Amino acid sequence: MKKLLLVIVVFSLAFTSFSRRPVGKISLKSDAQKKLELKLKTIKIDKLEFDDEEVLVVFKQLRVLSKKADPAGRGVNFVFRNLSKSKKRITIILEDIPILYAIKSICETAELTYRVDDYAVFITNPVKKVVPEK
């Protein structure tokens, strides 16, 4: 009987400790990264329209538009990895949107991924997961 009671107490303590949530939210983002994310959410682009254009050309234009729309005049930097040989083309029409939404839309349309770093947005081809054969 004592062993059964001990097992029940141990299990109840284990389950209650797993159900607790952390009090504070842990953030691994740097201050520069948070600042860039805020800029991406607040700066709006009036219009972005391309018909069957290479994705690199679209991002170059987005860079120019971000400089014009940024009150500080700095805009957003983009870094491209493994896209030099890519000739992906997209058609996109966006109006009155935050730069972050434009980046998400372009990447989704072109099947690319993005990551906000300290001072630039990195644009890459998605990593293909290799599934081992059985």
Image (tube, grey):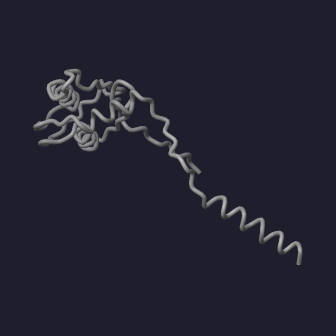
- Write the residue at 35% across / 24% down: 119
Residue 9 falls left or right of residue 128: right
From this view, report whether residue 92 is shown above or below residue 82.
below
What is the quadrant of the N terminus in the image? bottom right
From this view, report whether residue 5 is shown above or below residue 39.
below
Q: Residue 114: where, in percent of width, then height?
A: 34, 36
Q: Residue 12: where, in percent of width, then height?
A: 72, 68
Q: Residue 71: where, in percent of width, then height?
A: 18, 26
Which residue is nearer to you in this view: 28 or 86? Answer: 28
Which residue is nearer to you in this view: 121 or 118? Answer: 118
Q: Based on the displayed image, in which of its 4 quarters is residue 45 positioned?
A: top left
Residue at the bottom extreme? 1
Residue 61 falls left or right of residue 123: left
Q: Residue 75: where, in percent of width, then height?
A: 23, 25
Q: Based on the displayed image, in which of its 4 quarters is residue 123 positioned?
A: top left
Residue at the right extreme? 2
Q: Based on the displayed image, in which of its 4 quarters is residue 19 positioned?
A: bottom right
- Write the residue at 23% across / 21% down: 74
- Write the residue at 28% across / 24% down: 77
- Write the residue at 43% across / 40% down: 128
How many numbered marks have been drawn onto this rendered protein structure? Answer: 0
